[in-house]
Image (cartoon, rainbow, N blue to C red):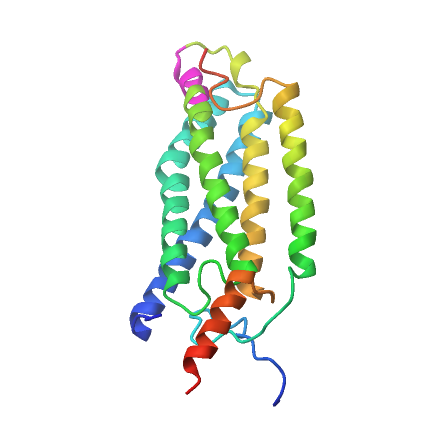
Amino acid sequence: MTTSPPRLRKALLTAHVTASVGWLGAVAGFLALSVAGLTGQDPQTVRATYLAMEATGWFVLVPFSLASLLTGVVQSLDTKWGLFRHYWVLVKLLINVVATIILLLYMQTLSSLAGVAAESTLDLSGLGDPSPVLHAGAALLLLLVATTLAVYKPRGMTRYGQRKQHEERMTAQP
Amino acid sequence: MAGLPRYPRSSDDAGTETGRGSTTGAPRWVKVLGIIALVLVLLVVVLLIGGNHGPGRHMS
């Protein structure tokens, strides 16, 4: 496996950490908005939170999630950690893929809620929805697990990783 | 220490060391995480079947 020069490798790592931690922070902000939207009493404030959530979703959460996934895959393939060799990398990949898919699917619901909020009527009956809080809470939990795995890198090689390691040892021997 | 299997350090974000720590089967933390994930997935499935949850439910 060929790896990129140290400077490029650092830049790739910086991009991945920025995208991933940015995603985590954006989800925390989204969670605050969703709680404000669920518990708010002032119609204008509640409507504003749903409009802000939709904008945050499309312009912050979705780009950060895709960037995190892309940079994570590139980063893992460019290092000795690999994409399928170590369990912690594999679990992080699964978390990233699942969270991104659910986010993209949920954006439909969020756009609909924002559509209701954008209507001129002050009727808030369609907005008392706990789903943004539930989705943001679950996403925050998943991303915290992923961040913990990235920092601690718990031991454990997959069967594929062990096989590749064995092959590399065999080729390295004279 | 000679004789002990080497494993990349957790501080080695760039993965410059070769991973030489071999294990047999999935470690305990993977199994625990897998069980928790399975329970959560089942919970979500029950909610999806039992309630009117899911993407696009506000489309109508």
* Residue at horizontal 42 percent and vertical 61 percent from the top: A76
Q: Is residue A142 visible?
A: yes
Answer above or below: position of A173 versus A127: below
Residue A114 at x, y percent in the picture? 42, 22
For this view, does B42 lie left or right of residue A24?
right
Residue A69 at x, y percent in the picture? 41, 49
Answer above or below: position of B41 versus A45: below
Q: Residue furthest bottom?
A: B2
Magenta extent: A113-120
* Residue at horizontal 51 percent and vertical 53 percent from the top: A92
Q: Is residue B12 visible?
A: no
Q: Nearer the viewer, residue A156 or B16?
A: A156
Task: Tell me the quarter of the picture where residue B14 sits.
Answer: bottom left
Total labels: the figure holds 0
Task: Tell me the quarter of the picture where residue B37 sits.
Answer: top right
Q: Nearer the viewer, residue A118 or B49?
A: B49
Answer above or below: position of A74 versus A114: below
Task: Tell me the quarter of the picture where residue A32 sits.
Answer: top right
Q: Nearer the viewer, residue A123 or A72?
A: A72
* Residue at horizontal 38 percent and vertical 62 percent from the top: A77
Dominant secondary-structure state across the stretch colored magenta: helix
Q: Is residue A98 magenta?
A: no
Residue A54 at x, y percent in the picture? 41, 29
In what quadrant of the picture does the C terminus of chain A appear?
A: bottom left
In what quadrant of the picture does the N terminus of chain A appear?
A: bottom left
Q: Nearer the viewer, residue A8 or B49?
A: B49
* Residue at horizontal 52 percent and vertical 74 percent from the top: B8
